[in-house]
Image (cartoon, rainbow, N blue to C red):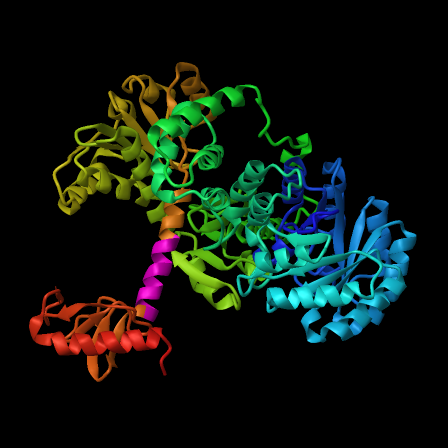
Amino acid sequence: MNRHNLEILECTLRDGSYTIDFQFTPRDTYVIAAALENAGFNLIEVGHGLGLNASSSGKGQAAATDEEYMKAAASTLKRAQWGMFFIPGIGQHEDLKLAADYGMDFVRIGTNVTEVEQSKEYIEHAKKLGMFVSANLMKSYALPPKELSIRAKLSERFGVDLVCLVDSAGTMLPEDIQNYVRTMQDVLNIPIGLHCHDNLALGIANVLAAIDCGVQRIDSTLQGMGRGGGNPATEVLVSVLKKQGIDLNIDLNRLMDVSERLIKPMLQEKGFDSINITSGYAGFHSGYLKTILKYADRYKVDPRDLIVEVCRADQVYAHEELVEDIASRLQQQEAGRAGLHIISLPHFAFADGKEMEASDDSLAGAVERVVTKARTTAKRRGKQSVLNIVAAPQAAEQTIVSRFVQEEFDYVIGSVEVGSPLPLEEIIAVADGVVDILLVDAELKPYLNEPLFTKGRSLAKQSRVVGYKDYDVWVRSVDQDIRMMLKDIRGRQITVCGTDNLSLKLVLSMLEQGARVTLTGATSDKLEVFGDSLKRMALCTGFLGIEADPVEAARAAEVMVSFSRRELLVSRAMVEVMAAHGIIFDGGIGSVPPEVIAYCNECGMRIIRPDMRAVLACELASLLGTDRTVNELMGRGEIAGVQVVAGGLVGKYGDIVVDSVSNPSRVVGVADGCGRVLYVPTEFTDQIEAVEREIVRRQALII
């Protein structure tokens, strides 16, 4: 295999951006480019997947401008060269000039293989600017090898430094690659590169075929991240090359760490496991993995190094004595290589400083910033973007747009709190179609004529609108915090200050969990009325006491909660009589005055404000799941002439219960006619088998 001048062009930050809707940020570019350089790469491509000026040309809005990507690459890379992609008609001459001003080392000018003439003026311009220029012959397979070679020769005459064979659809076989490369070599006097996709899982095989013919530059991406079927995976490619004796001075373990920690979290249902890669590289059988992990942990060595060294000694067996001996030796070697695997990054790679700095102080500007950040973060994390629009507890002129975007479970959520319905139309106009979901408060607050959700549902045209009950989420957040902090609340003394809806909901929940609750914040008569109602509603026997004097109500309390911002505020006198190490919940975010907060901090008492992230995300998941159940899974139908039901719909005796009436994947059982499912219904075996056969037929697309 020809090893002369072989280079890998790492394309994750460019081609990989297709996978996340071009949402790599300048910070991503800083960090990933620096990590790649530290791993040993000399060539790194950045920017929009479709190249310079693509965002401005309506080809998909990237998370940053071309100039921001240029600045990120130029300021972080010290040794590696960096470049960007350019498609004539999308990119312009001024884009090349701007890139040159930032010191860009190379540009890849891509045209369809049948339209090479379009590249001439841009090749000549880039060469005058001092760049290394590659001609990427996109959709190379569209022409036979001899005709493609003529187009490649034309690119050479225009002045390019390298011609790149491009398998845009991932459709070429290794023998195709060799045929094209050898035919090109007959006419070209410049190096040849290869950019291929992995649609047929032949990316690595095609790369090896190309290298065998003398191709000098190969494109790849971490985790195979890229458009369509992705690209040859960099970490796999480096492993295979090392296995064949081609060492490009790339630290394989460091490379795999970069891939798993920085790239894999961005992907959904895709990615490579570094242990599996190492096992393939070394010839390691996974049956001995537990032994490897046991001694890697005991001796604090990298299990991947241990796998490689064990297999050098014995690829068939990994006896414990052998593994432990090698692990011990590796530990001694690692002591002399301290810091080798530490990725060094420029200090500014972690600077978020100005990302939320306001250049537009209007409501629309603030909303645009938060929904853009939610969308960008969600695309990079493989999650759904959400804007939560909640009505404030009391009427207010001010609309509060949170600068904090939360990430919980499958969602990235930005939030806006409004004190009247007036700004709702402006907020939705900005957010609609940017975020995936508008999560809108469906609670009827005292100052509203109708819930925000009612109007919001009619305003949004693109984003999905989901309504939720804000008070329920609010109370559950405090409720769950108390349970997590106290572990078991049975018999624990909890004081709740106020007779508002939130307070009463919490009291009822605490009673049902067996707590000793004291309710205060109103006159004795009013408290008596509420107390009687709560006792009748409670499903189990917690103790409820009422106390008009708030100080007496707080005496010996382990937890004190107040949601009120206007009525009873928590006082220092109340805090002073609480149990030692008591916990105070500022449930109304303003129900504990600043001077009381200062006192609590001085004496070491904890004050907690509701953090609703987890509960809000769970509520959203529950709502979406219920919506799917009702609208997609639930129903009655017929499969193979047999009556079926799904999604909780109560069937007649003998109806076959499936998991979904619209897209069934399995039989659950048989309806007993009373709302239950029979799981061993022998008399309906024929019907079950008929339904199962039809489901299998549909899944196999046998039409």
Q: Quadrant of residue 60?
A: bottom right
Based on the picture, tell me whether residue 626 belongs to the magenta stretch: yes
The quarter of the image holding the C terminus is bottom left
Q: Residue furthest left?
A: 683
Residue at figure coordinates x 34%, y 73% from the top left:
699
Q: Position of residue 408 (x, y in %)?
A: 44, 45
Quadrant position of residue 698: bottom left
Return the residue found at the far right: 128
| 241 to the left or right of 119 | left
* Residue 128 relative to residue 516: left or right: right
Position of residue 70 relative to residue 79, above or below, is below
Q: Nearer the viewer, residue 141 or 629?
A: 141
- Residue 418, can we see it? no
Name which residue lies at 39% across and 48% down.
Answer: 616
Give the prevailing secondary structure in the magenta stretch: helix
Q: Which residues are magenta?
A: 620-632
Front in this rendered view, residue 633 or 104: 104
Is residue 594 among what the camera can see? yes
Left or right? Give the position of 291 relative to 311: left
Whole-percent x, y for residue 363 in the image: 61, 51
Question: Which residue occupies the foreground of this view, 436 or 316?
Answer: 316
Residue 659 coordinates in the image, percent (x, y): 26, 67
Whether residue 699 is situated above or below residue 531 in the rendered picture: below
